[in-house]
Structures are given as C-alpha cells and as structure tokens.
Amino acid sequence: MNTDHPISLISPGLRINKFLPVAALYFFVNSIFLPQGLLYTTLLTPFFIVWLYNQRFMKPFPWFFFITIVYACIHLIIGVELTFYIISYILFFCVFVFCCTFYQFTRICSSLRDIFRQLLILNFLLLIPAVIAFFIPDVKGVFWMTTNVSSGLNQFSRLKMFTYEASYYSMLLVPIALYYYIKMLLFRFPNKGIVFFMITLPIILSFSFGTMLGLPLSLLLLFISDIRLFSVKPALRKFFLAALIIFILLTVLFIQIYPDNPLFLRIANIFSGRDSSFRGRVFESFYLAFKAAEEKSLLFGCGLGQFKVVAKEMVAAFYHFTQDYGTVRLPSSVSETMVTFGITGLVIRIGAQIYLFFRTKVHDNYYRLALFIFIFIYQFTGSFLFNIAEFVIWILAFAPVFGEFDKSNVHSKKES
C-alpha cells in the first residue's frame, strides 16, 4: 500500500507527531543564540545518555572509549595542546552520543515518514519570511549569509535559515530531498509538482554546489547501479528523456539570455581552477592535512583539536595571510580525519563505511543506497569531523528504514 498521505502538517488522526519538537530543534534551531561549534543537541548529551541507558543501548560505548583512549595515549606521547584536546574530546564524545541516540531512534520510530513530511512543510513555511527578509537589510542576516563564493561572485547571498552556514543547511535537507525524489520517481505520489518545488527551491537558494551537484549525481548513479529501475514505471524512460531535453533547452536558453548567471559562472570557475571554495575543499585541504599530520605523525595524526595549533603558521604562509585570520578548519571531513587520526584513522573510517555497507545490506534498499552514494562522495569535498548532519545521513544509510524502497518491494510493486 502507499505509505504517503497528501502533504499536510497534521498527521492522520489530527495529531502532530510527538517527536516533531526534537526533530525541529535539530533541523531548525540547533545552533541559534549559541557560540559557533556548540549545539543544543550537545547540551542535551546527559539526557541522551540516560535515554540510551533506559533503552539498554550502551554496547557501543566501550568500543568508543577503547579506540579513542588508545589514540589519546599516542597523541599525548607525541605532544598536544591539552586544553584544546580535552575540549575537542568532550565534543567528539557528545557527537558519538547523539549518533547512538539517533540510530536507536530509527530502530524504534515508526513515524519517520510523518516527521519528514512535517519538517518539509515547516521548512517551506519558514521560507516565506526568509524571502521577505532578503529585501530588508536589518533582518536579512537572520536567514541569509553573504560571502565571496567564487571569482566574480562577491557578496553573494545564500539561504542558511537559522543555521550558521548555507552548506550545513543544505545538508540537513538531503535525507528529506532524496526520500521524496526517489518516491516520486518510483511510485505513484500525490502533489508531485508542489512537493518537488518545496524541496528544490530551498536547496537552490542555499547555493551549496556540493549538494546541488551531489543529489542528481547520486540519483544518476543509483539508476546506473540497477538498470531495472527504468522498467519500474512504464513512463520512467520517457520522463528521463524529456527531462534531459528540457535541461539542454533551458541551458541553451540561459546561455543566450543570462550567460553570467551565478550557477554557470561558478561552474566555469571550477573548470578553470578559479573557484577558491572548490579548490580548497578538493585539493588544498588534503595537501594541508598531509603536511600538518607530517609535523606530528602520519600514522596517527596530530590529535583532536590540534590542527589549529600545528598548522596556524603553515596556513598563513600557504594562503599568504598578512594578519590574524582567526580559527581555521579543513573543509572536508576526510581531510580532517587524516589530520586528526592520521592514515590509521582514515583506514578505520573508510573501512568501517565499506564494512557497514555490506553488513547492513545497503545495496538492498534504493533510498539507503542513494544516501550512501551521496555522502560517500560528499565527505571528500565538504563537511567536517564533528558534523552531526553528515552522521545523520550515514546512520540513515545503515539503519533499517523505509522498507518500501527495498529492491524486492520496488520490483514487486509493493510498498510497505
């Protein structure tokens, strides 16, 4: 049977989902009024631990302490700035607790579809004041961030909603976006045009190139991975052909009418090597991670919170900074893993992802496979080590969610 209802904020039975307040906290206001780097989900760590204890889900904790204490001993021998290390270790532990909490939540929650629908609607409702605020300078900064995105795109405004950064906001949207995109492609679904608009517009306004490119790429690779998907719906092949023709026509039209639009300009900058953001994420971050880890240990890295200490002068010299530039962070979770835990940490990270891919049979569920493809690629070009939005995507990829996307159900035309 079809598991989706027409888009409305109230779930069947005229009740708002009981988990919605916590989901809304994570999605909308997790960092509002807090110093950068601190989240409300971090402050809730003691409550999460108590909840996990009551759920009898404490088995992962000994493994966390065993692995991190081994690394801590090595890093202390190598030498670290202890204050930064302790603070970062506490934050790392809080992220771990949140991940355990969210994973256990996916195991016991039977209303994740309702939560996704309600978050989608709330996000779109908030988009209305955000668009109005765009034209009011005094309040624009509440919803939008203005930065130098690329060469020729100076002081460009991007939607961040109540988060601290537009790329982070767009990553929050990824699980919901892929859920509805795949749902609309594979199944009969009500209000397709409206839902597509509600999902896609905020992503476009965030102008996060990693997400804007990663979503269609993950869908394309998903269909390539199983060519049978094209036969699920009789009109699907015609739809893709029509979409391709429309895309080509719109591209040509934009080139003729608006050749200097921000999207085309940034793509041109990427291919010409003039896009500082793309260059910094894909190439420079790995170079700096390698050089910084080399200062301490290529095998085990510099340790938690140590990059800002070890690489401060290195970064200043690399980018020719002439004044204090504040705290620096590598713009890639893989490069940050490399500089923090070295080659061994990188092997553990990628090895765990591959192991869990087969252990949890990600390949048997199209939604989870699309999430895995997206975040596996994205981790090399963005995010950061403590990014809970990234971990949420990983957990959803490995958790037993949304059985209607199981290959057996899709190809038998049965939705659970």
Image (cartoon, rainbow, N blue to C red):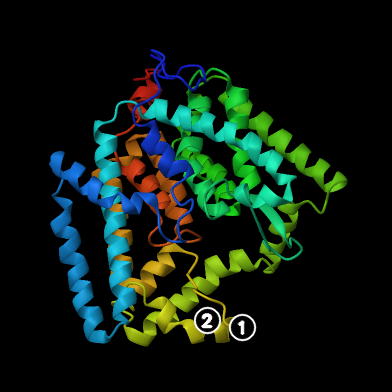
Give me the disc on residue 380: none
- Quadrant in the rendering for residue 353: bottom left
Q: Which amino acid, by three-letter code, is at mark 1?
A: Phe
Q: Residue at x 71, y 63 (%)?
A: 269
Name the residue nearer the viewer: 3 or 72: 72
* Residue 244 pos. (x, y %): 67, 36
Q: Say which residue appears at 81% left-offset and 44% top-offset.
A: 254
Q: Give 416 or 309, whichever is nearer the viewer.
A: 309
SS for callout 1: loop
Q: Nearer the viewer, residue 269 or 392?
A: 392
Q: Residues within 10 Å of mark 1 (few under 14, many from 20)?
A: few
Measured as percent of width and height from the top left, residue 341 is found at 31, 72
Q: Amino acid at mark 2?
A: Val
408 vs 14: above or below: below
x then y, percent, for residue 29: 47, 45
User: Judging from the image, what secondary structure is the residue with disc 2 in?
Assistant: helix
Q: Residue at x 48, y 27 (%)?
A: 183
Residue denoted by label 2: 315
> Eyeballing the image, is 2 above or below 155?
above
Quarter placement of the C terminus: top left
Q: Quadrant of residue 302?
A: bottom left
Q: Do tag 2 and tag 1 residues touch (Cβ < 8 Å)?
A: yes
Left or right of 35 on screen, residue 85 = left
Does residue 303 show up?
no
Furthest toward the right, the residue is 257
Residue named by callout 1: 321
Numbered-mark total: 2
- Taking the spot 74% from the left edge, 60% from the top edge, the residue there is 153
Residue 224 position, x and y percent, is: 49, 40
Residue 104 seen from this side: yes
Quarter of the image containing the N terminus? top left
Q: Earlier in the sequence, mark 2 or mark 1?
A: 2
